[in-house]
Amino acid sequence: MTQDLIVYLLFMSYAIAFMVGLATIFTWVERKQSAIMADRIGANRAYIRIPYTQVKLTCMGLFHGLADGAKMLLKENFTPTTYDSFCYNLAPWLAATPVLLVFAVVPFGGVLMPGHLFDAGLLRDYFGDRAYAMQVANLDAGVLIMLSISGVGILGIMLAGWSSNNKFSMLGSARAASQMISYEVVMGLALISLVVTFGTLDIGQMVRLQSGQMFGFLPAWGIFKQPLAFILFLTAAIAENKRVPFDLPECESELVSGYFTEYTAMKMGLFMLSEFITIVVASALLVTLFLGGCNLPYLNDAGFLFPGGSRIALPHLAVVLLQLFTFLVKVFVAGCFMVQIRWTLPRFRYDQLLNFGWKILMPLAAVNLVLTALMRWFTLRMI
């Protein structure tokens, strides 16, 4: 029991560090990537000086995220004169916490056997042959848990807009509510198509089913089995994150800052950080469900097994590190792609946004689900 507690505490610590660390890096990616696209230099002013020297380390603007965090923490917290105190203070946490909880069902690695990380030593004696799926919460109904938790975040946004007693905030929260509910339906239908394809609600099992090959050479990833569901899920994930071209709830040119206009200091920072954490979580889900998760082609728990029977044996520690690194790189690339979309497409008009969700994506998702169910039924019947 103590061994299990230690392992899961490490998993939780890694998950939090993974989300917060990548979210901080994505603030830098957003600045530098937009600067490259606009032929600008971008963030390059924040630095750390080496003591007793004139050497300033800028690291291409990487320290701007740390500077922003310090600024938010040290700023004075102004509040509106007329507002609901309890809901006003609860809203940022209610918006950010569900995003963190969703990652609990995401597998960020394969199987960890602490006693086999090294050939001999205290770890082997203490852990024995215990094996752990590298996932904070290994649940059979992971897809349902993910959908139910992710829907809670809208409550924080609605509370923020209502409790601020500001017409711009209220309009932003109303836009966010209708937008997020609309695109959650599309996301749910895309996920149901994937569930029908894999025949399970267990996200960890979905990742394991993507570890093989199709036609002898193509990775058995969800994107090849459900390409339309991948496009629908990606679009809905961007809309759920309220990013351009779906940033109507907080578009600066119309609503100042939308639902968090009346927030300052770290409360506003929490809203902004939750947006970048949502990029990380959405990218992680995209990678897990459609891009093989931590799987590398031809990699299994014993090493690489190539077509034809040739293999490269690897120690357990090397396999674990490869899987962690593979998942990290995939999530980073997927997040950069989402940032690229944010600086590429123009903003929808609000009626266009809802029409796109209900009149285009929704019918496509429904048709995809029906066709998937028919193909699944026909395949099982043939067997």
Image (spheres, helix red, strand yellow):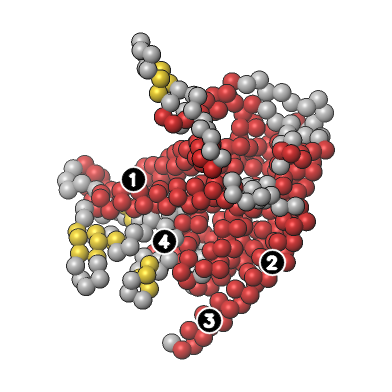
Q: Amino acid at mark 4?
A: Gly
Q: Amino acid at mark 2?
A: Ile
Q: Give the spatial CA distance, label 3 vs label 2.
A: 23 Å
- The residue where tag 1 is placed is 3
Q: Nearer the viewer, mark 3 or mark 2?
A: 2
Mark 1 or mark 4: name the one nearer the start of the chain: 1
Residue 144 in view: no
What's the mark number on residue 375? 3
Q: Residues within 10 Å of mark 3 (few under 14, many from 20)?
A: some
Q: Give the spatial CA distance, label 4 vs label 2.
A: 28 Å
Q: Nearer the viewer, mark 1 or mark 4?
A: 4
Mark 2 or mark 1: name the one nearer the start of the chain: 1
Mark 4 or mark 2: name the one nearer the start of the chain: 4
Name the one closer to the observer, 232 or 151: 232
Q: Amino acid at mark 3?
A: Met
Residue 167 in view: yes
Name the one closer to the observer, 351 or 240: 351
- The residue where tag 2 is placed is 360
Q: Amino acid at mark 1?
A: Gln
| Number of marks | 4
Place of residue 262 in the rendered image (x, y in percent of width and height, measured from the top left):
74, 31
Q: Quadrant of the C terminus?
A: bottom left
Q: Quadrant of residue 298?
A: bottom left
Mark 3 or mark 2: name the one nearer the start of the chain: 2
Is the residue 34 above or below the residue 320 in the image?
above
Q: Give the spatial CA distance, label 2 vs label 1.
A: 50 Å
Image position of 247 (left or right of 98):
right
> Quick one: SS at disc 1?
helix
Is the residue 381 above or below the residue 162 in the image?
below
Place of residue 371 in the rendered image (x, y in percent of width and height, measured from the top left):
58, 78
Q: Residues within 10 Å of mark 1 (few under 14, many from 20)?
A: few
Image position of 331 (left or right of 324):
right
